[in-house]
Image (tube, helix red, strand yellow):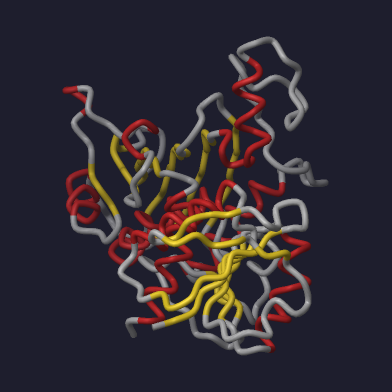
């Protein structure tokens, strides 16, 4: 039995964490739901019981808590995760605050395990999570030489603000979250632009992939991240070059047996991964595997996953499951 806290419990990811924890086989003795003062007092349900949302403060972790799943933004994580850690709580944080800290584990359960040098574990970026799940077994067999990502990211990745901008855009209402309308539009812009011309989102994918897969600087990685008018589930086009000779059939065979992956790859029958297939499940869907005719020993993979479940809530719960079942 374990006691859990969910920080940011009333947000898009927080409510999905509650749902995903409810579905799990984890033995939850007590659950504490925490959020800002605006959401304190709300009543949510967990496994048939009503739970009152508490206001997050410096004393929230004075009680007996084993795991705290955080999804309340980077500044909240920076402030409160160390407080929880000092009380012996294992924090699984969904923000970008801790990901590239060399002392902090950045974990996708299908790819790596937490070493627990500190009791804070970082959830990677949602697009990174779904991409490294199929890349891990390919790298183990053939070795990665180059990765090019192009993402097609759903508005749910921006929380309720992004969802509302897409809904309201259909009515001609001006966007509140994005700098331009997302309805009937595509924005080649996720997070802030940096001096090198990339966005923070693009650099997150590059740096996090290297950390999770333990890739050295000889592996070339680049990314372009795009917001599309889809409510849920991200799509990523992955173009890879490999060290050892490979074939389409060889890659298919690896992915058919890879943990956390579902192969949908019969394009001649119009069967390939789509956001509608992925929404509501935890598997990463892959397909449209083909040879890149422009480069030697290179291949394209189309990858789709539910960014709120596998890309956030489920990955966090899977980490807790891994630690509880070790």
Most foreground residue, 274 or 224:
274
Q: In what quadrant of the picture does the C terminus appear? A: bottom left
Is residue 201 visible in the rendered image? The answer is: yes
* 124 shown above or below 252: below
Residue placed most toward the observer, 28 or 271? 28
User: In the image, what residue occupies the spot 44% across and 71% down?
Assistant: 319
Which residue is painted at 22% across and 28% down in the image? Answer: 271
x and y, in percent, of residue 290 in the image: 29, 36
User: Which quarter of the rendering shows the N terminus?
Assistant: bottom left
Above or below for 79 versus 269: below
Which percent across, then down, holds residue 27? 36, 76
Q: On screen, 309 above or below 5?
A: above
Q: Nearer the viewer, residue 117 or 240?
A: 117
Residue displayed at 17% across by 45% down: 249
Decide if residue 300 is in sight here.
Answer: no
Number of disc labels = 0
Residue that appears at 76% across and 28% down: 176
The reply, left or right, for residue 260 in relation to residue 162 is left
- Considering only vertical position in the picture, is 263 above or below 37? above
Residue 58 point in image, percent of width and height: 78, 77
């Amino acid at each position: 039995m374990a006691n859990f806290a969910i920080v940011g419990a009333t947000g898009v990811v927080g409510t999905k964490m509650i749902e995903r924890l409810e579905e799990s086989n984890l033995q939850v003795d007590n659950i504490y739901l925490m959020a800002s003062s605006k959401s304190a007092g709300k009543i949510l349900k967990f496994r048939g019981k009503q739970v009152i949302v508490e206001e997050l403060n410096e004393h929230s972790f004075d009680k007996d808590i084993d795991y705290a799943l955080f999804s309340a933004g980077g500044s909240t994580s920076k402030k409160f995760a160390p407080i929880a850690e000092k009380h012996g709580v294992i924090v699984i944080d969904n923000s970008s605050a801790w990901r590239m800290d060399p002392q902090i584990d950045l974990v996708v359960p299908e790819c790596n395990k937490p070493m627990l040098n500190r009791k804070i574990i970082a959830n990677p970026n949602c697009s990174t999570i779904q991409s490294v799940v199929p890349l891990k077994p390919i790298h183990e067999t053939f070795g990665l030489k180059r990765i090019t990502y192009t993402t097609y990211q759903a508005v749910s990745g921006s929380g309720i603000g992004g969802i509302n901008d897409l809904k309201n855009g259909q009515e001609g209402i001006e966007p509140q979250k994005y700098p331009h309308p997302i309805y009937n539009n595509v924005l080649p812009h996720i997070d802030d632009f940096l001096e090198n011309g990339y966005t923070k989102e693009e650099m997150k994918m590059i740096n996090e992939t290297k950390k999770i897969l333990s890739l050295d600087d000889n592996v070339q990685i680049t990314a372009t991240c795009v917001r599309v008018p889809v409510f849920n589930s991200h799509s990523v086009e992955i173009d890879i070059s490999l060290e050892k000779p490979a074939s389409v059939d060889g890659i298919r065979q690896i992915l058919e047996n890879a943990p956390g992956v579902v192969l949908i790859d019969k394009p001649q029958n119009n069967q390939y991964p789509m956001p509608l297939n992925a929404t509501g499940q935890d598997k990463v869907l892959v397909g449209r595997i083909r040879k890149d005719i422009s480069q030697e020993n290179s291949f394209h993979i189309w990858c789709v996953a539910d960014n709120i479940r596998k890309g956030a809530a489920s990955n966090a719960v899977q980490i807790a499951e891994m630690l509880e079942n070790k």
